[in-house]
Image (cartoon, coloured by chain):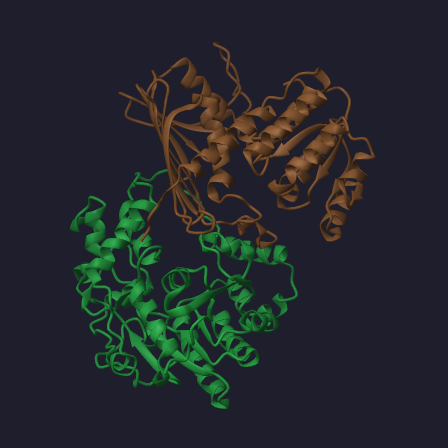
Amino acid sequence: MNTANLSTSWAVIGASGFIGLRTVEGLHGRDGVNLRPVVRSATSLAVLARRRLDWRIADPRDLPALTEALRGCPVCLHAALGDPVQIERMATIAYRACAAAGVRRLVWLSSASVHGQNPPPGTDESTPLHESHPLAYNNAKVRAERRLEQLARDGRVEVVRLRPGVVFGPRSRWITDAAADLRAGRAGWLGRGRGVCNSIHVDNLVHALRLAATVPAAAGEAFLVGDAETVAWRDFLLPIALHLGLDETAFAEPPPAPLVAERTPPLAALTRTRLYQRLGDAVPDRAKRLVKGLASAWPAPAPARDAWVLPRAPAGRLTLEQTLLQGCAWKLPHAKAARLLGYVPPVPFAAGLATSLEWLDFAEGRT
Amino acid sequence: MKPPNTPVSLALVGCGAVSRLFYRPALRELRRHGLVELVAVVDPRPEARDPLARELGCAACASLDAALALRPALVAIATPPSLHRVQAEAALAAGCAVLCEKPLAATADDADAIVAAAARAARPLAAGHYKRFFPAHRALKTLIERQTFGPLLEATLVEGGKFAWPAATDSFFRREQTPGGVLLDIGVHVLDLLRWWLGEPADFTYADDALDGLEANARLDATFAGGARVRLRLSRDWRTENVYVFRFARAVVHCRVNAANQLEITLDDLPLTLAAELRHPLPARPAPPSRALETNPQAFLAQLVDVCAALHEHRPPFVPGAEGAAALRWVETCYARRTPLSLR
């Protein structure tokens, strides 16, 4: 028996983002389900407005507004983005809003990074989580999951957590950033890209979201989801280079980034504190933009340029996240999703990459 | 353009984002120079009109009629397009000149009606296509007409990015309230420029990605008299290069969107690109560097100065209403010929 009935509405929080938008486009009208996009502001409707949809405008950190936006929906899919503090806060507010609005099931889009970007071989959903990752994002995702598990003990809302890896497809930063790095001559890879890329095409993730929303046995569970194939990073990155008319020589082999916890500049760190974010609810948007602008501009003044240097092209580089991801040797399994949800990824990796590159051509004005 | 001698009394209709971001600083500056006297701002929403009226030191009116009773010489209309016709006709009937933001109206028929009303009232009507005042765009018109680098062979124009305009409500995205998407929003500026530069297209095709709503991506391919081929890509979905590229017989010219006084010129047989700020011309003798031509905000100011001067000099404005109506007619023809743009 499915959670959703015919002619029902599912809310999608964060519907204007890469995954949220694809979810709305992929599932709206399917099986008698209408998707109700929930976005932070009218500005976020620009692409969603290609269809006539019954959208709502509500900040995912605003409990009363979000509760109102979710009323009448038995299912809520949460795909909103945020900084680490927002991620944790959104989990609490999403649960409480669902409970208050009578939502029966909340599908929380978590991340495989709760296990780290480079999880030890053997990792699966039963592997205990920890909060000692070098990336603050990972730790926030872990805390958000734990918070949801704790909240769901009251039994008011069923919570399903999905843990996708590298989600790619049209509009994905994994495609556009790689293309931009290649074109700028700063692309790098580790060990010629032999590490495992735990990829999942966005349409496979949308398929998993649908199953997570509807399969009764999913309640209370967490699921790793990915593509069917075991993909190496070179399988992912090299076709992008070839598509741009480049080849393997476009990738430098720079030294890996040091594996130390990332540091946030002080002012930016201030904007990510719980206190600031609570106070921030009462601060006008203009003042927030000013602080954010200052945070991005400070404290890294441009170094004085030495006139006596040879002009040179940018060098290949690897960020901490790339270093961790490309050092991965373990294909995260989705056997649990297959067993409990009946998850079989419908889009083969190669086909998904091909459509992503088609979209890149369009987005960059070549078609 | 010669500035007028006495301040032009002006009423600003609509207190949304355009008024806050463009008209507010522009009117302050023009008032500082004694070019305009702002008599009223108009908006049915007190929370929108009252702060703006306080800032600009003028009356806050809930209706256009109340503002017209103050007898402004010029009415600037910056409201949603569905209101343009009724407001422009009322202002013209009251004997005011009108500067109407783009698109000139919700439909080309409404735009024609506004143009006819201006003719009947014998008052100036200006279309808010202020990008014609960009020095770079004026320079391109000269390059195309005089064939300085030979004839124009082709042009590729890409404009847009993730939508970031601070829309106050979702009316901008509801088809019943706003009749078009990215083509009507930013595309109407570009179609106006193309008509100004190249005349009417000989033929064109158009595609966009609207389903039963408003398009976020659009593509137009056109040919013009003389054989120039133009491809236009617009997006409110994804960051584009935001550049117009013109391939002449002997040079390529890049014009960055909204970089009002800059051009990048690559001459054939010269292995470099000149990335140039456009300035007042230098004499053919030793001279200090000359002043830069207008920036984007200064081009907006130039449009207002031009309309004021048109009033004083009893001449049509630089961008008359009929030009705005023609650009809108082209937009509508695009929608009528629309084919689906499939994005997977």
Q: How many marks?
A: 0
Question: Compared with residue B170, is residue A325 higher up or lower down, i.e. above or below?
Answer: below
Question: Compared with residue B118, is residue A215 higher up or lower down, i.e. above or below?
Answer: below
Residue in the foreground of this view, choosing between A315 and B311: B311
- Chain letter for the part of the structure drawn in brown: B
Picture quarter with the N terminus of chain B: top right
Quadrant of the rendered image containing residue B159: top left
Q: Is residue A229 visible?
A: yes
In the image: residue A354, left or right of residue B283: left
Task: Locate residue B17, reporting x and y percent.
Answer: 62, 46
Residue furthest to the top: B284
In the image: residue B32, left or right of residue A43: right
Residue pictured at 46% horizontal, 40% vertical: B183
Residue pictured at 47% horizontal, 81% vertical: A104
Residue pictured at 30% horizontal, 55% vertical: A175
Residue furthest to the right: B69
Residue in the foreground of this view, choosing between A47 and A296: A47
Task: Locate residue A197, reporting x and y percent.
Answer: 23, 66
In the image: residue B336, left or right of residue B314: left
Question: Compared with residue B317, is residue A356 higher up or lower down, i.e. above or below?
Answer: below
In the image: residue A256, left or right of residue A146: left
Residue in the foreground of this view, choosing between A262 and B26: B26
Residue pictured at 40% horizontal, 67% vertical: A262
Chain A colour as displayed: green
Task: Locate residue A148, reporting x and y percent.
Answer: 46, 82
Task: Locate residue A251, reporting x and y percent.
Answer: 21, 52
Q: Is residue A298 visible?
A: no
